[in-house]
Image (tube, coloured by chain):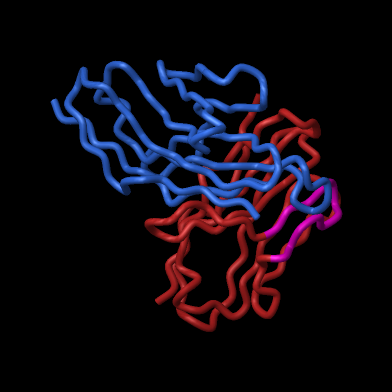
Amino acid sequence: EAGVAQSPRYKIIEKRQSVAFWCNPISGHATLYWYQQILGQGPKLLIQFQNNGVVDDSQLPKDRFSAERLKGVDSTLKIQPAKLEDSAVYLCASRRTGRYNEQFFGPGTRLTVL
Amino acid sequence: AQSVTQLGSHVSVSEGALVLLRCNYSSSVPPYLFWYVQYPNQGLQLLLKYTSAATLVKGINGFEAEFKKSETSFHLTKPSAHMSDAAEYFCAVSGWGNYGGSQGNLIFGKGTKLSVKP
């Protein structure tokens, strides 16, 4: 089975510019997560989707970050405008519904904001 | 509230030596615990998970971890390190007692980078 796909793998932008990341989860996985991983830290959850609905976005900086999963499959995370502190790896993960099921992670997008 | 503490941001062992990576957790509900490995420029891969069954959990690549409730620990071990084990390891906790928005969400530690010397 194909894994979680993410693009682009790398992105360099200037501060105040906009950027978007794309994620395609494993087929059949209803739950999708976006994480932010700053260098030297563990991943931090930004947002969780169940199908096309948001379950948890309590840690998403909503003044500049937005995410959608319109058809309940792939998802886009956007930052507008970017700040220097947004430099990080953005990881997407998906999970099949069920208590014991694990999250599968994509390779991530490394964002550098100059 | 849940949290994870990984003791030691960097651990170095010789090839063939015991690997011990420490993880302590805090959780107000029965925890589910996970160890993930991350190789450079890659996503996270699950090594093993504890979901309230056997307290000694065996994972991939010869790793295992033991859940000790009295010590709130879930340390990761491997009897004999291999060069290919060099990577960053993350411990994570998930609580299923809260069936609201945090169902299945993972709280990660800061990670431990494992180096293996020849």
Q: Is residue B14 left or right of residue B81?
A: left
Is residue B47 visible to us here?
Answer: yes
Farthest residue, direction bottom: A16
The residue at the point 59 percent across, 75 percent down is: A18
Closest to the observer, B55 or B89: B55
Residue at 52% x, 52% y is A43
- Residue A54 lies in the magenta-colored region: yes
Q: Residue A48 magenta-drawn? A: yes
Chain in red on the image: A
Q: Is residue A51 left or right of residue B66?
A: right
In depth, the one of A74 and B87 nearer the eye is: B87
> Residue drawn 43% across and 51% down?
B110
Measured from the top left, where is residue A113 in percent x and y?
A: 44, 73
* As drawn, A70 above or below A30: below
- Residue B40, horizontal then vertical, whole percent: 36, 42
Q: Quadrant of residue A84?
A: bottom left
Residue A70, compared with residue A29, is above or below; it is below
Quarter containing the N terminus of chain A: top right
Please give the range of residues in magenta. A47-58
- Residue that extends furthest to the left in the rendered view of this protein: B118
The percent position of residue B75, horizontal first and vertical second, equals 43, 31
The blue one among the chains is: B
Classified by dominant secondary structure, the portion drawn in magenta counts as strand
Side of B5 where A90 appears, left or right? right
